[in-house]
Amino acid sequence: MLRTLRAVGLFTATLFAAMLCPLDLPPLQAQQKGAPTVPATFPNLTSNANIGTQRGKTVELTLTGTNLLEATGVWLSFPGKVTIDEGQKDATKLKVKIDVPAATPIGVHSIRVATKAGVSNLRPFIVDELPEIAKKDGNDSREKALVVPTPCVVLGTVAAEKSDYYKFAVKTGETITIEALGRRLGSPIDPVIIFYDGKGQETAGLYADDTPGLQTDARVSYKSPSNSELIVEIRDTTFRGGAEYGYRLRIGNFPSATAANPLFVQAGKKTDVRFTGPDAANDKPVSVTANATDSVLYVSAKSASGISGWPVPVQVSSIPESSEQEPNNEPSKANLLPVPGGVTAVFAEKNDIDHFRFQATKGKKLIVQALTFEVNAPTEVYMRILDAKGSEIAKSNPQQPTPRIEFTPPADGEFVVACEQTNFISGPNEVYHLSIRPVEPDFTITVGLDRVEAPLGTVGQVPIIGLAKLNGFNSPIELTWEGSEGASGKVTLPAGANPQPNAPIYLPIELKAGAKLGPIVGRVKAVAKVDKIEIVNYGSTFDIVKAALGNMPNPPLEMTTQIAIAITPEPLFTITLKLDSTEVTKGGTLKGKIIAKRTDKFDEEIVISAASLPAAVVPTFKPIPKAAQEAEISFSVPAGTPTGPGVIALRGTAKVNKKDVVVMALPITINVKDAPKKK
C-alpha cells in the first residue's frame, strides 16, 4: 500500500495580482516590536491526538477547544467530507460528522477548524483500516481486562498512576503484533506494554518500551505456542496520565515494519521499496514513483491476510539514489557513489563495514552525512574517509546527533567512505542513508506562524521570521503562495534581506473574486538562482508543528510546511491608501490620504499605523476621526533612503464591541529617485 503526502498538496502558484507595479515587490518589512503571535480570537483545538476513524466509515466527533463558535469550515489533509452540526452554542465544543473515503491511506493526517474569527492549530486525525474499539472505564487491572477481538485498534486514554488492560485470544502458531501508537500521533504518552497469560501471570520475554525506530512508542510481535489468551497492559513509562494522554493500541496479524529500504527514492524514478523490522524479509515490496513536488511518501507492508502494517516514510530526493550492493566490506570492493548521490545501506552481519568510493576534486568541499533517527531507522553510524592508500584522513564525531563530515579533498582522485555501526549491532533492521554532496550555496526560510487570516476585501500576511544563508548564498529569493486557487501572493526578498522574529518580512496574500468563508491551506515556495542553477525550498514551521505534536522528536515532514489561512468576513471597515504620486525624490515628501469605507454599523475612530515602510522613510499619521471618511497622511523620504522600489503597507485599528479589530490596506509600491545633481 502506498500513501503519497505532498507538503500540503499540489497547486499552481499564482502571482500577487493586486499590485499596481509590474515589478516584483520588495519585501514587506515589519515596523512592529515583538514576534508575530496568533490573535487571541482565533480558535484553538485541544482534541486528543488519537481522534480518527476507520477508512470508509463515517464518524461523529465532538472537537474540543476554545473560540469554536461560528465555524465556517473544517479542513482535512485528505479528501473527506465534513458536516458541521448546526445550532452550536458552546464555544468549547464543535460537533462534526466526517465521511472518510475507503481509498484514504492509513496513517496520521491532520485537521483544522476555521471560524469567522480565524483558523485553528493543527491536530492529528488518524485513519486506520482496523475496526475501532473504545476503551471502557474500569479496565485498570488484569482481572478486569477488557476483552477485545482481533484484529482491532483500541482507542484509549491512560490516567495518572494507572494502567489499562486488554485481553484477546491467540491461536497455535499464530503470529500477532501488538503496537502502541502515542508519540507518533502527537500524544505526550511514552507507552510501555507488558504481557500476561490468560491467568494473569507475567509472560517472560514479552515487554516493549522505546522500540527502536518508533520515536519512543512500543511494539511486540508474538508467535503463540498454543491456543490461549493473552493480556496486554499499557501505561506511561513514568506513570503520567490525564485527558491528553491518548493512545491507539493495534492488535492483529499485520507486518511490523520499522523503516523503509531504501529510505530515499529519487523523484521521477520507479523504485521497489522493501521493509525493515521483525520478519520484514517476508513482506512484499511496494513499487513507488515520486513526483518532484513530493516531499515524502508513506508505504505500508501487508500481511498474507491483507492487513496493513503501520506506514513508514520514504523521503523523496532530487539527487541520484541507489541501494548498497554486497559484498563491500573492504575498500577494494567499495560501491561507486556519484557526487552528488545517496545510498541506502544495511549493517546486515556482525562486524559489517560498508565501503563507498567517490571521485573528488582538490579543494572542492564536500559534505558526507548519514541519516538514521530522522527517517525512522534505529541505526547509529560512524564514518571515516580513506585515501587511495587506505589511510584515514577524516572521521565523524560520535558525539554529534547526526553523523557528518565536512571534507575538503587534498588532491584530485578517488576516496572511500567507510561506515560501521557505532554500537557494533547488526541485522536487517540496521538500515541507514548515506549521502555525499558538494558544498554549494543554499538557504532556509522560517515562517513565524502556521495560521493567519485574510478578511474578504483586505489582504492577509504570512510572516517570514528567518532566512539562513548557507555556503556563501547571497541572491534574491522569490516567495510565492502555493496553495488553493482561491488565493495568491508574491514578493521578492532582496539579497540583503534579514528577517527576524521581531522584524518579519511579510508575504501578502490576496483572495480572488468569489472566495468563500472557511479554511485554505498552502505553503510558501521560495525560489532563487545561483549561477543559473535554480534552488527551490519551502518555508518551514518545524518548531511550531513540533510543539503542537507534544514535542514529537521527528514530526511528519509534510506537516512542517503547512500554513492555514482563514477566509473571514469582510470587516465593518476597510482602509485604502491614496498617494498623490508613487514617485519621490530623496529629501522630498509623499502626500496622500487614507480613506475609510464603513458599514452602517460602524462609525468609530480608526487609528493608522505602519505594517511596512521602505528603510528610513518617516510617516506622519492622523487617525480617521469618528464618522469621518478620510485623513491626510505624509511620508518624509530622507536623503539616505535607498533608491528604487519600496512598499508602503498600512494597518487600521479600531474598537468594535470593546475589542481591537485590525485591517490591512493593500500595499502600494513607490519609487525613490536620487535628487537631481546641481549644475
Image: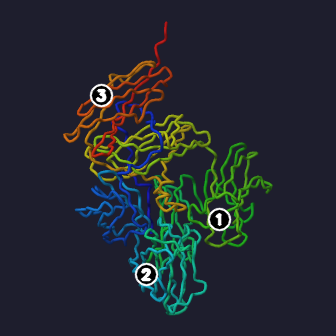
Examine the rendering and report whether any part of residue 328 can be seen: no
SS class of the residue under badge 3? strand
SS class of the residue under badge 2? loop
Tell me the kind of residue under disc 1: Gln
Instruction: Please tell me how crowded label 3 is: few (under 14), some (14-19), or many (20+) other residues with Cα within 10 Å.
Output: some
Instruction: Please tell me how crowded label 2 is: few (under 14), some (14-19), or many (20+) other residues with Cα within 10 Å.
Output: many
Label 3 or label 2, whichever lies nearer to me, is: 3
Tell me the kind of residue under disc 3: Ala
SS class of the residue under badge 1? loop
Where residue 631 is drawn, which disc sits there? Answer: 3
Examine the rendering and report whether any part of residue 104 can be seen: yes
> What residue do we see at 42% from left, 41% from top?
507
Q: Are marks 3 and 1 in contact (CB under 8 Å)?
A: no
Residue at image mark 2: 151
Q: Quadrant of the N terminus?
A: bottom left
Label 1, label 2: how far apart the Cα atoms are = 38 Å
Please tell me which of labels 3 and 1 falls first in the chain: 1
